[in-house]
């Protein structure tokens, strides 16, 4: 057991920060948090324990990225196109290269290493259609220690030649990967079936995905109502469905294990379907701005009781940093307020922080495992030095001001260390 001494900060409730200036986190041999509290109270109860005094650093729960594309990392920041032409011009050629397992291995190593260096401890990841590249991604996640749900992309219609799959083969390969990886490393590695989006999936594929999720408990991740041209295309392809969300509902793809990327342009009936299923919307504000897709009315969706988390959606979004994603979450909400006069649209840093931690954990059905610094949870946490936000945050400032600096002025050096289940997976040199 180890006792970590630092300023503790988390957001177990929406919009409310829990700040313990002279805090202590006791982590047991299994990597679980056995006690959370103040150092003066916990230290005398744990005499003889190894104490790691991290002051003046702060400990925050690890950040959770609910939507990110591993093979797109090398194609970030390709500006100038909307979703569909951007996919054809930049993304599909990049994904086709993952037929080369050596390239896939190198990319996965850099990708997960960078996530950990930014304080992301859990990521929900799209691979490519390639089984081997997906297997390699799992192996890299296994060895670097990150918590991840990964899935091979599935596309059996309207995809470019090099990325087109046979329906049965796609389902078969996904099932093999589920058997191999879902729940491995004591649940640290999970499978997330990844039918790319309705236009590139046949009804047979979607029904097969639903059956696999029901049978194995694997997550389903896909895209929904991101771009207006995409929505028009879906209407044309599935005229029998009431709307885009109904395509997924009819093929039984909406359940409590479903993560829906974007969800910008949804009507009330679609939101009701998502709520009824208990599925989660992954808000990707950087990507939605970058690809000119729109600005999701986050506050309204959230007030309606929808389950919501945040995703970087690299390479739709130009950064892997969840700090920046939290900043964008706040910034674009201010634009809704300023330009559309939408009452109460503005999101506060503490709320964005909640979405990136506890709310994301709830969306994954893992609220008893991750998302805060509560006793009994796995010790997934990040050690930050707020003095490295530039200009330096004063650590004696109120916690909400320090959090605001960490989010809006994130410095790559401020993450000093990242722990997953009590194991240090990243340490800043010097
Ligand atoms: Zn995406």
Image: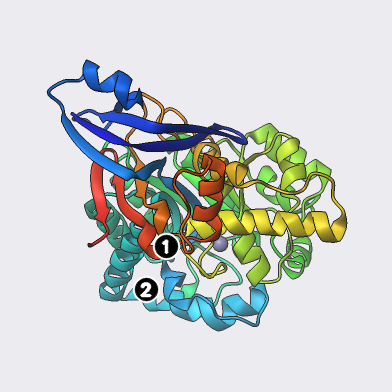
* Relative image position of residue 314 (x, y in whole percent): 51, 66
> Of residues 8 and 303, which is closer to you in this image?
8
Q: Which residue is found at the position 39% from the left and 78% from the top?
A: 97
Judge whether 7 appears above or below 385 on screen.
Answer: above
> Of residues 249 and 282, which is closer to you in this image?
282
The quadrant of the picture showing ligand 1 is: bottom right
> Of residues 167 and 193, which is closer to you in this image?
193
For marks 2 and 1, the one nearer the N-term is 2
Q: Give me the disc on residue 178.
A: none
Q: What secondary structure is marked by label 1?
A: loop
Q: Is residue 264 visible?
A: no
Q: Is residue 260 visible?
A: yes
Q: Is residue 180 left or right of residue 20?
A: left
Judge whether 377 appears above or below 130 on screen.
Answer: above
Q: Is residue 392 left or right of residue 380?
A: right
Q: Is mark 2 within 8 Å of ligand 1?
A: no
**Mark 2 to mark 1 CA distance (whole Å):** 9 Å
Q: Which quarter of the figure has residue 278?
A: top right
Q: Which residue is mark 1?
A: 127
Quadrant, the N terminus: top left
Q: Is residue 242 left or right of residue 4?
A: right
Are the residues flagged by discs 2 and 1 in contact, CB closer than 8 Å? yes
Q: Residue furthest right?
A: 341
Q: Residues within 10 Å of mark 1 (few under 14, many from 20)?
A: many
* Relative image position of residue 213 (x, y in whole percent): 49, 41
Q: Which residue is found at the position 82% from the left and 58% from the top?
A: 338
Q: Which residue is mark 2?
A: 98
């Amino acid at each position: 057991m180890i006792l970590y001494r630092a300023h503790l900060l988390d957001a177990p409730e929406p919009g409310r920060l829990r700040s313990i200036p002279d805090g202590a986190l006791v982590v047991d041999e299994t990597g679980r948090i056995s006690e959370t509290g103040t150092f003066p109270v916990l230290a005398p109860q744990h005499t003889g324990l190894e104490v790691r005094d991290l002051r003046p650093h702060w400990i925050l729960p690890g950040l959770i990225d609910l939507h990110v594309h591993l093979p797109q990392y090398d194609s970030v920041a390709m500006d100038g196109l909307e979703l569909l032409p951007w996919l054809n011009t930049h993304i599909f050629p990049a994904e086709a290269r993952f037929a080369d397992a050596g390239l896939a291995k190198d990319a996965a190593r850099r990708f997960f290493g960078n996530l950990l260096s930014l304080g992301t401890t859990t990521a929900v990841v799209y691979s490519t259609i390639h089984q081997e590249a997906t297997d390699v991604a799992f192996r890299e996640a296994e060895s670097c220690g990150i918590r991840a749900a990964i899935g091979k992309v599935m596309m059996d219609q309207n995809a470019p030649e090099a990325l087109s799959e046979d329906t049965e083969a796609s389902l078969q390969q996904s099932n093999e990967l589920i058997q191999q990886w879902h729940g491995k490393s004591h649940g640290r590695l999970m499978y997330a079936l990844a039918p790319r989006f309705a236009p590139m999936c046949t009804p047979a594929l979607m029904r097969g995905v639903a059956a696999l999720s029901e049978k194995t408990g694997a997550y389903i991740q896909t895209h929904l109502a991101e771009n207006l041209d995409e929505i028009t295309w879906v209407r044309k392809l599935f005229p029998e469905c009431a709307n885009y969300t109904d395509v997924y509902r009819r093929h039984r793809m909406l359940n409590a294990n479903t993560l829906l990327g974007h969800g910008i342009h949804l009507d009330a009936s679609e939101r009701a379907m998502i709520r009824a299923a208990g599925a989660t919307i992954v808000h990707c504000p950087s990507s939605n701005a970058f690809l000119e897709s729109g600005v999701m009315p986050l506050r309204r969706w959230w007030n309606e009781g929808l389950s919501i988390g945040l995703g970087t959606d690299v390479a739709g979004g130009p950064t892997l940093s969840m700090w920046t994603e939290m900043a964008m979450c706040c910034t674009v909400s201010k634009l809704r307020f300023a330009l559309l006069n939408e009452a109460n649209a503005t999101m506060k840093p503490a709320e964005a922080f909640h979405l990136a931690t506890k709310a994301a954990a709830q969306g994954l059905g893992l609220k008893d495992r991750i998302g805060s610094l509560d006793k009994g949870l796995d010790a997934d946490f990040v050690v930050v030095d707020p003095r490295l936000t530039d200009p330096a945050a004063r650590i004696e400032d109120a916690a909400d001001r320090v959090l605001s600096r960490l989010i809006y002025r994130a410095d790559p050096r401020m993450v000093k260390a990242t722990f997953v289940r009590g194991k240090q997976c990243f340490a800043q040199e010097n």
